[in-house]
């Protein structure tokens, strides 16, 4: 079993994100979703083939940790919410790869630039306060040619569902769901931030049953463009966007 470090560099006087009630609900709901709606299998496919140093932004309660392949040499897991971070530390202790759980926010990552081979975004862009700034930080910490793996929910469905998502975002949903937004477009956000999109696909979670405002998900990969005159470590494939509406 590899040696791992599961605590940050020190205590912070005040957590930048504090949603204790939602954190307790999310911790229970997310565990049930692993098998109940097949989210565990989606996580496994998301992380397959990664290698080197990885930073996971918004690690939550650490459910991704069990799915990292042995080719990953280190995971730095950023989580701003205290309760979820404590649960992530416990999950890191059970991980087969070294995981260091660190407090921090997506808009100001506490790590050096160009230090990671891959970035994992897993159900996090819906909740960050400033998506362009957060993706700017992703570009900063990712080496040129490095890969982004993403699993996000966002806008989807027909006109009625999209209207409902926008209406909930303007009213009760962010307050009830720890700052989450339903009508964001993660693929467009990555493209606007200058990433080269690789293959991605849209899916419904749960796959069967009622279509919920949170059901419309997308998973795939993107790359930070290499510096001029250099070759990327991995070339992105063609985009793919099956219709899941």
Image: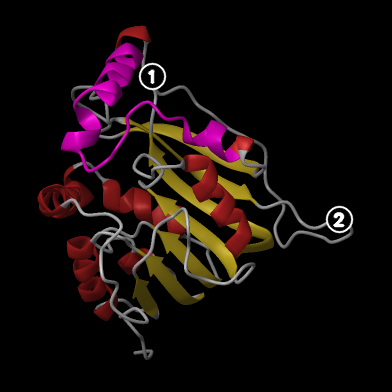
* Residue at the disc numbered 2: 228
At a point 34% along the width and 78% down the height, the residue shown is: 8
Residue at (45%, 59%) from the top-left corner?
A: 47
Q: Nearer the viewer, mark 2 or mark 1?
A: 2
Residue 219 in the figure: left or right of residue 35: right
| Disc marking residue 245 | 1
Please report contact status of discs 2 and 1: CB closer than 8 Å, yes or no. no
Q: Position of residue 204 (x, y in %)?
A: 33, 31
Question: Going by the picture, which residue comes out furthest to the front?
Answer: 13
Q: Residues within 10 Å of mark 1 (few under 14, many from 20)?
A: few
Highlighted range, magenta:
161-190
- Cα separation, mark 2 vs mark 1, equals 39 Å
Q: Is residue 156 left or right of residue 191?
A: left
Q: Horizontal and vertical percent for residue 245?
A: 38, 19
Callout 1 secondary element: loop
Overall secondary structure of the magenta section: helix
Q: Position of residue 97 (x, y in %)?
A: 39, 78
Q: Please tell me which residue lies in front, 50 or 167.
A: 167
The residue at 47%/48% (across/down) is 150
Which residue is farthest top?
Answer: 159
């Amino acid at each position: 079993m590899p040696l791992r470090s599961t605590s940050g560099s020190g205590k912070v006087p005040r957590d930048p994100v504090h949603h204790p009630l939602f954190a307790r609900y999310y911790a229970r709901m997310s565990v049930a979703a692993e098998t109940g709606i097949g989210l565990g299998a989606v996580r496994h496919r998301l992380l397959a083939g990664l290698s080197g140093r990885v930073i996971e932004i918004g690690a939550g309660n650490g459910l991704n940790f069990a799915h990292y392949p042995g080719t990953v040499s280190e995971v730095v897991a950023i989580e701003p919410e205290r309760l979820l971070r404590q649960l992530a530390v416990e999950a890191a202790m059970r991980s087969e790869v070294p995981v260091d759980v660190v407090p921090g926010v997506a808009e100001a990552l506490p790590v050096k630039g160009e230090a990671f081979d891959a970035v994992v975004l897993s159900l996090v862009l819906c909740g960050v306060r400033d998506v362009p700034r957060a993706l700017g930080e992703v570009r900063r910490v990712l080496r040129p040619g490095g890969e982004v793996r993403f699993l996000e929910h966002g806008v989807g469905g027909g006109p009625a569902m999209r209207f409902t998502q926008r209406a909930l975002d303007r009213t009760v949903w962010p307050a009830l769901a720890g700052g989450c937004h339903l009508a964001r477009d993660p693929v467009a956000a990555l493209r606007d931030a200058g990433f080269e999109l690789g293959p991605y696909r849209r899916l419904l979670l749960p796959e069967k049953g009622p279509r919920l405002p949170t059901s419309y998900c997308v998973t795939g990969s993107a790359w930070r463009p290499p510096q001029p005159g250099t070759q990327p470590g991995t070339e992105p494939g063609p985009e793919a966007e099956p219709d899941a509406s």
